[in-house]
Amino acid sequence: MTAAPVPAALPLLEIEELHVAYGQVQAVRGVSLRVEEGRIVTLIGPNGAGKSSILSALAGLVPPRAGRVRLGGADVTGLPAHRAVAAGLSLVPEGRAILGRMTIEENLVLAGEKRRERSALAAAMEEQYRRFPILGERRRELAGSLSGGQQQMLAFARALLARPRILLLDEPSMGLSPILVQQIFEAVEAIHREGATILLVEQNARLALAISDYAYVLEHGKLVLEGPSGQLAEDPRVQQAYLGGAR
């Protein structure tokens, strides 16, 4: 007797023919992509390619013009931001968007109080303080007093408190010095090793391809290439356009 074929596992996140527009400006033009559970998938491409617009649509910051988004098989297309977080889509936005006039601890309480019982929130915050010790050391200081890299760590901690099914990272290295960029990418890898699924938008294509499993290349709102990250890093077109030329 021939064994029945094993059905392919559904991706954790599936985007089908997504369109995003700002008035008459078409930012995303029919993009389809998948993110398997436990993977890091990266979107690379030039400025204005539509990468951040995809994350904004997923996070409920801008409604998609057309298309379908599924998370764990459930339709989450066009959810407002608070419902997107509740569904498991947690965004670390470009520029971090921390609340600089509030303390580090107040930033974390605000991020976690809607998603956790009060009794569990303190323990969850301590977990983030262990992950990012500088935040624990300075928990009662204003978030605006942190360096850029430390603010990025706070942005990560806030997003993780929401217990996301998938973490959406929008340009986490933006504006940071090379040594801080390395530290932030090490933090991303550590979060991934603990089981997080990550969709990463990053201008530093070399680092993004180095830490991710699969990559999509966007240009003018459309996908132009995709494949395992290691293979794309060796593609002459990607090397020429995004990695500083052929090696």
Image (cartoon, rainbow, N blue to C red):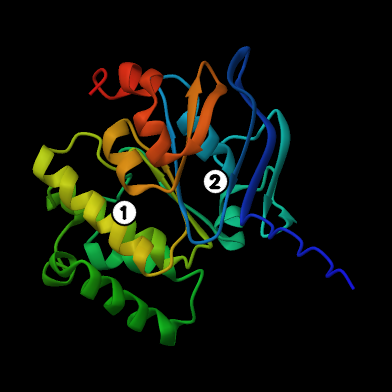
Residue 155, by quadrant, is bottom left
Residue 12: x %, y % from top left: 61, 57
Residue 139: x %, y % from top left: 18, 69
Of pointers 2 and 1, the one earlier in the residue sequence = 2
Q: Which of 230 and 168 is in front in this view?
A: 230
Residue receiving disc 2: 59
Kindly tell me whether residue 186 is visible in this rendering.
yes
- In three-dimensional space, the C-alpha distance between marks 2 and 1, rounded to whole angstroms, equals 15 Å
Question: Which labelled disc corresponds to residue 155?
Answer: 1
Q: Which residue is drawn at 35% across and 30% down?
A: 234
Residue 32, by quadrant, is top right
Residue type marked 2: Ala
Kindly tell me whether residue 148 is visible in this rendering.
no
Residue type marked 1: Ala
Q: Which of 165 and 224 is in front in this view?
A: 224
Against 80, is 47 above or below? above
Judged from this view, the residue extending furthest toward the right is 1
Residue 25: x %, y % from top left: 58, 13
Q: Residue at x 70, y 28 (%)?
A: 65
Question: For the C terminus, which image quadrant?
Answer: top left
